[in-house]
Image: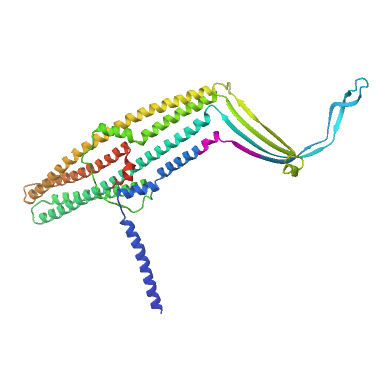
Amino acid sequence: MARLTANLKAMFLLIVIFMYSDNLFSQETEVLSLNDCIKIAMEKNSTLKISRMTNESADKDVLGSYSGILPSISASANTGKSESGPREYLGDAPVGIDTTTGNVIYQQRLITSERTSRKFNSAGLTLNQNIFDGGVWWNNIRKAKTDRLSAEYGLEADQNDIILQVEQAFFDLNKQEKLLEVDELAVSRSQAQLDRTEKMYELGAIAQLDVFQARVNLGNDRIALLQQENVVGQAKKNLNLVMGRDPFTPIKVSSKLELEPGLPESQELINSALENQPGIMQNEADIKSRDLSVSLAKGIFYPNFYGYVDYRRSNEDLNRVYSNYDKNYSVSYGFGVSLNIFNGFNDYVRVQKAKIAKRSAEENFEAYKRNLASEVEQYYANYKSYQDIIEINRHNLDAAKEEVRLAEERYQIGAGTFLEVREAQVNLTRAEQTLIAAQFNARIVLAQLDNALGTSYSNFATGSAQ
């Protein structure tokens, strides 16, 4: 029985270990495409969450802007007791009647009053309605809607920015992993060279110095490999952070890389950016909002017409306040007008500051368009340069491979030196690294160009991001 129990415990332990190891394995081998990473970021990125909250707040501001034209209704009720203590004071007191005129005769006397106590109860309902306020209520509604439109464009711009950050982190991770593979190949080549060098030394074909040099080269390549492993680890953390995930979440990404063979002319791209970039529309909405702020500031110079109704009930007896509604009440209603004539130049200053804010927004908009055109032109030039650099480096890589082959052959037959072999290997590693960096940097420039054009999110929504 004891043996059976022990076997069952062992089996249970194995099942638990298998379950956890399978879970860890599935996490470790999770492979995400660029589209997968963007989807995660759209859901979890903190910047986008805050931007959506700002957009939601702008929706609430639109609803609140209608308060200027809707009636305001308030109700009040109170109950209490007032007391006055005993007091003495000089006052006019009646002392008789004038027999000739019949009027009451008053003389100043010391008057004493006893302590008094009185209850009070009241309830009321007040309605105020704005009739005309110089267009303030109307412009408030228009401004709130314009600010909401600006927030929507701001959210779209934030989505484009986050997609760019994801793409940069995604392709940087791809680049660093490819560079890690290059470092692994460099270590493999150095190890193979060390093995050949040791055999040649055993045969007496070379000096021992070459063996020591081969070991040093292998050690240096291993150090570079270890450093690159750390770079890859940091690149994984960066991608996780951009996606709004825990930085230590295990992650693997697909290594698919596609480059555009050709681009439209730079001026066509600039025109597209000026037409589609959400930052352009956001700036236009901000200028309109500033213009409405000017109208709001001017509204104070107009008279304000309003209507009101006030209904009150009061009595010492609480029950009479809330019964017999044909008694114990008072009603006042009417129309009013108010006009602010002078308040120390505050209104004038408000109007001038609103105009300055509008001019500032217009100037910022012009600077934004100039900078946007410059960015698009620069990304276009960078990408064209990278296309040439990639093509050049492909030829350099072929030449570097042939250089290594010839150097190794010359060294084995004693016609070359170990230094020539090492230099050829270093050139090959550098050519591999340069080509990889150029390819992925070119892809990152494409992502930057999409962001400048304002098409990052639309490309993702239509499935263009892979």
Residue 133 spot, x, y in % from top left: 55, 28
Please name the residue shown 34% across and 65% down the image. Answer: 18
Is residue 298 visible from the viewing direction of this image?
yes
Outermost residue toward the top? 100
Q: Quadrant of residue 433?
A: top left
Q: Nearer the viewer, residue 365 or 298?
A: 298
Is residue 236 visible from the viewing direction of this image?
no
Residue 339 spot, x, y in % from top left: 59, 23
Please name the residue shown 62% across and 27% down the image. Answer: 336
Does the magenta run of residues contain 275?
no
- In the displayed structure, 338 sits above or below 181; it is above
Q: Nearer the viewer, residue 161 or 120?
A: 120
Please name the residue shown 63% across and 28% down the image. Answer: 335
Q: Which residues are magenta?
A: 63-75
Left/right of residue 285 with respect to residue 400 in the rendered view: right
Outermost residue toward the right? 99
